[in-house]
């Protein structure tokens, strides 16, 4: 027996999932995190392709670790120059080809909309592992599972987003998703040049009546937060180096700033970090970003199992 209606579907942005489906993935992710060995054979015989047209450490390797821990195998490339893209092959043809070899594809591409295009040319589910400054739905699943692990809920939270809110696809995906749960409010902390795109304010926050404020200084707002979501100023999204150099160290979370926060604050960061969190913060119990990395693998195990329709141990009980 297969799992449910998620089988065979692609995941391009978090809105592709209903709140019930999100809960299904997060609940399975939590079960896997509690007892990963129980799931070691559920994808035996299945193949995951990881196609990365942009650099990655966590997303690509956690997808590969996830499939291997489910008993499946992986193939793919970590940079486009190692594929026939370098010879001029179109994305559509690459995806059509790989979907003849694999049961599921995880793809990262610098172009917004590339994942949607890929899903239209694939015979198998495509998971968006990041498309430019657009979306990163599996990072959102990672963030939600981490938040649930410490707050035991995803609603009624005051969440501060700090840093590059303009280009940060992890921020865009998480804001869109948290806006669907009741009672959440946002504090948007950024320099004027890196504010949240206007479309997210006018098409997501305002229609949903989400309370939000903007701030320039982390010190002024950190005490009011349940969650602080730090982000990197992304060099690769800037058109000129001068602007990047001017803005890159806008926010640095250190012990002095963390001392202004409440004891139950949860500090998240999708990583990689550059300077925005001082390593002296890492040993603070409120620093969750390396636990977040681990949750990322478990929630990707859940997602792969559900999208491939793998039989789960729960169903045989
Ligand atoms: N969080 C994240 O997407 O990290 P990578 O760029 O290392 O995959």
Image (cartoon, rainbow, N blue to C red):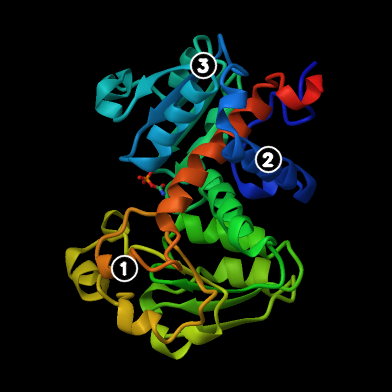
The local secondary structure at tag 3 comes to: loop
Depth check: 27 or 171 in front? Answer: 27
Judging depth in this view, the residue of 259 and 62 nearest the camera is 259
Q: Compared with residue 268, is residue 20 higher up or lower down, i.e. above or below? A: above
Residue at which label 1 appears = 277
Residue at 52 percent across and 45 percent down: it is 295
What is the number of the mark on residue 72? 3
Q: Residue at x 71, y 72 (%)?
A: 156
Residue 3 location, x and y as percent?
76, 25
Q: Ligand 1 near label 2 (Cβ, under 8 Å)?
A: no
Give the label on residue 205, or none. Answer: none
Quadrant placement of the C terminus = top right
Residue 25: give its label: 2
In 3D space, how far apart are the residues under numbered discs 1 and 2 (Cα atoms)?
Answer: 30 Å
Circle 3 Cα neighbour tier, 10 Å, few/some/many (<14 / 14–19 / ≥20): some
Nearest to N terminus: mark 2 or mark 3: 2
Q: Report crowding for label 1: few under 14, some 14 to 19, many 20 or more residues within 10 A (C-alpha).
A: many
């Amino acid at each position: 027996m297969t799992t449910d209606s998620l089988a065979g579907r692609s995941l391009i942005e978090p809105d592709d999932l209903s709140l019930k489906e999100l809960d299904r993935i997060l609940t399975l992710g939590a079960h896997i995190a509690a007892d990963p060995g129980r799931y070691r054979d559920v994808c035996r015989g299945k193949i995951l392709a990881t196609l990365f047209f942009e650099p990655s450490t966590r997303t690509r390797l956690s997808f590969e670790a996830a499939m291997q821990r489910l008993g499946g195998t992986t193939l793919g490339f970590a940079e486009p120059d190692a594929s026939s893209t370098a010879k001029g092959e179109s994305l559509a043809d690459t995806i059509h080809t790989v979907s003849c070899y694999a049961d599921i594809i995880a793809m990262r591409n610098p172009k917004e909309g590339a994942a949607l295009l890929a899903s239209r040319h694939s015979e198998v589910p495509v998971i968006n592992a990041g498309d430019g400054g657009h979306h990163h739905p599996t990072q959102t699943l990672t963030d939600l599972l981490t938040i649930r692990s410490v707050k035991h809920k995803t609603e009624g939270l005051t969440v501060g987003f700090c840093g590059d809110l303009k280009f940060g696809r992890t921020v865009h995906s998480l804001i869109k998703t948290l806006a669907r749960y009741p009672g959440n409010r946002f504090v948007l902390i950024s320099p004027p040049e890196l504010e949240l795109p206007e479309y997210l304010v006018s098409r997501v926050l305002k229609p949903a009546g989400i309370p939000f404020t903007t701030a320039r200084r982390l010190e002024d707002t950190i005490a009011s937060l349940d969650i602080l979501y730090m982000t990197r100023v992304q060099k690769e999204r800037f058109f000129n180096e001068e602007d990047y150099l001017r803005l890159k160290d806008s926010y640095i979370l250190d012990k002095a700033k963390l001392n202004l926060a409440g004891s139950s604050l949860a500090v998240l960061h999708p990583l990689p970090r550059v300077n925005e969190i001082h390593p002296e913060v890492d040993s603070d119990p409120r620093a969750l970003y390396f636990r977040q990395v681990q949750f990322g693998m478990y929630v990707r195990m859940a997602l792969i199992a559900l999208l491939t329709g793998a039989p789960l141990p729960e169903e045989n009980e």
